[in-house]
């Protein structure tokens, strides 16, 4: 059974930093690209970032480019999101998701971890 | 990167069919057969319902179907059931540097 478990969400002050983690199991992690997607309270889904199976290619939404860094450790079956210079508008539930086809087909999602940016 | 355009809400009665549209551009929906649809119930994670325009993952009811014409993709739900009431999101692969774009979401109400 595929499982994705996010962690690391907390309350952080504006301008602060945070690292989210996603532990994957139930599939061959290093065969698949992975994504982070966020959802602000009461709002829709917003794609955040994508990393290729080997970590060699990364992509970001314009809203986080230059502030967030996606990475992965295939030896630990783990995905990460380093978040710097956090803003109030980054407040959201952050989901990690597996890409079934490397073309944006997010076939499995975690339950999310909540990041709140507030003073 | 602008979001794909979806209607904010649609509604239908049990047993009826509804269609949700998702409009993009030739750089995303119109340029690739990589449109996906997700269902999200309140407080739950999104669930993949359709991928690559018209393919259903194992376990998804055949009441859900997808199609595409030009820059607009569509999700059709036939034989509406109360459990179909949820938010629905489309997404597409895009040639832009961001690679993935979502629609704004559509709230389906089963009357």
Image (cartoon, rainbow, N blue to C red):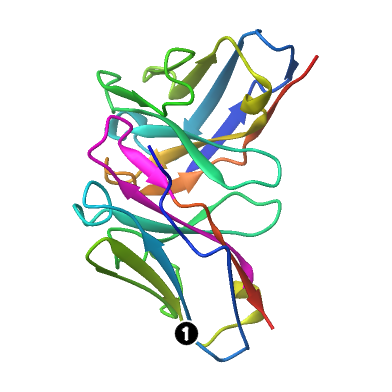
Above or below B100: residue A7: above
For the residue labelled by badge 1, is the local secondary structure a helix, a strand or a loop?
Answer: loop
Chain label for disc 1: B
Image position, residue A98 (x, y; %): 41, 40
> Furthest residue to the left?
B31
Q: Which residue is drawn at 26% across and 60% down?
A: B71
Image position, residue A107 (x, y; %): 41, 50
The question of residue B91 being in magenta is answered with: yes
Name the dominant secondary structure of the magenta segment: strand
Q: Which residue is drawn at 37% across and 56% down?
A: B36
- Quickly name the residue at label 1: B78
Q: Is residue B97 left or right of residue A46?
A: left
Above or below A17: residue A98: below
Stretch of the chain drawn in magenta: B85-102
The quadrant where residue A6 appears: top right
The quadrant where residue A31 appears: top left
Q: Is residue A85 left or right of residue B26?
A: right
Image position, residue B49 (x, y; %): 44, 63
Above or below A8: residue B5: below
Image position, residue A16 (x, y; %): 66, 8
Residue B96 visible in the current orientation: yes
Between A103 and B31, the residue placed more toward the observer is B31
> Furthest residue to the bottom?
B15
Q: In which quarter of the image is the N terminus of chain B?
A: top left
Between B97 and A77, the residue placed more toward the observer is B97
């Amino acid at each position: 059974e595929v499982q994705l478990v996010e962690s690391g969400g907390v309350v952080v002050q504006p301008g602060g930093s945070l690292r989210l983690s996603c532990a994957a199991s139930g599939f061959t992690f290093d065969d698949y690209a992975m994504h982070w997607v966020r959802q602000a309270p009461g709002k829709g889904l917003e794609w955040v970032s994508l990393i290729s199976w080997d970590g060699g290619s990364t992509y970001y939404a314009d809203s986080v480019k230059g502030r967030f860094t996606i990475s992965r450790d295939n030896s630990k079956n783990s995905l990460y999101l380093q978040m710097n210079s956090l803003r109030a508008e980054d407040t959201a539930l952050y989901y990690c998701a597996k890409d079934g086809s490397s073309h944006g087909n997010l076939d499995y999602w975690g339950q999310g971890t909540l990041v709140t940016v507030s003073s | 990167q602008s979001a794909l355009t979806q209607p904010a809400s649609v509604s239908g009665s049990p047993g009826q069919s509804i269609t949700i549209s998702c409009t993009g551009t030739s750089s995303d929906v119109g340029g690739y057969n990589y449109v996906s649809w997700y269902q999200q119930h309140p407080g739950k994670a999104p669930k993949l319902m359709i991928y690559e325009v018209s393919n259903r993952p194992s376990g998804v009811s055949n009441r859900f179907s997808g199609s595409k014409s030009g820059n607009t993709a569509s999700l059709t739900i036939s034989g509406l059931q109360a459990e179909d009431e949820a938010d629905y999101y489309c997404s597409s692969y895009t040639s832009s540097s961001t690679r993935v774009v979502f629609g704004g979401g559509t709230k389906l109400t089963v009357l």
